[in-house]
Amino acid sequence: MTATIRPALDSLRSLPTLYQISETWGKLELKLETDDTRYWVTTEGVAQKTNGAPINYIVDYVTVEKLTEEGNWDLKAVYSPEAWRLSQGFDYCQVIQQELITLRDQLDARFSWATLREIEGLEHELEVANKVVSELAAQVRKRAGS
């Protein structure tokens, strides 16, 4: 499976609304639907976690649904904006890792200085990305604890 980076929250917000669900808690807007995933953004609701309010009705949270083998949409996760950025960071690291595997296979099959330099550059990029992901994870943990 090819790794992809999920869309940025600002990008999702700017997409036209495909469908919306309005309830007493707030409003969820379906912003993007792929073959197997739906991305909903909460545009109206509570400003922060509160007792009794469903977590997916916090403004700017992203709700992700996945298509099951039976053809039904299943709620998979609800992300705060910070957790969404963290997940994008994980996605980015996966993309780099897949590219490194491909390049290392190429290098094993046929040595090339250019390929080796590209690997070294991606290894450095992955190191930097992992540091950023670590910092984002700390922010998410800190926010979850407050």
Image (tube, grey):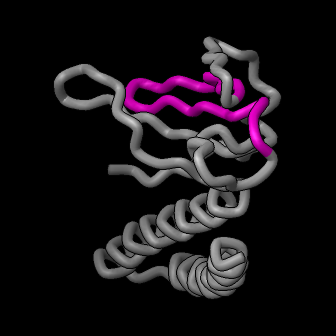
Q: Quadrant of the C terminus?
A: bottom right
Relative to 49, 14 lies left or right: right
43 in magenta: yes
Coordinates of residue 45 in the picture (x, y in percent) = 75, 35
Q: Is residue 60 depicted above or below 105 in this figure? A: above
The reply to whether residue 125 is in sight is no
Residue situated furthest front in the rendering: 52
**52 is higher (above) or lower (below) than 73:** below
- Residue at x-position 46% and y-position 72%: 97
Q: Which residues are magenta?
A: 26-46
Say whether residue 2 is visible. yes
Tell me which secondary structure the magenta stretch mostly adopts. strand
Q: Nearer the viewer, residue 7 or 95?
A: 7
Viewer-proximal residue among 87 and 25: 25
Q: Position of residue 8 (x, y in %)?
A: 72, 46
Query: In the rendered image, which quarter is residue 69 located in?
Result: top left
Give the image quarter of residue 59: top right
Q: Residue at x 40, y 24 (%)?
A: 35
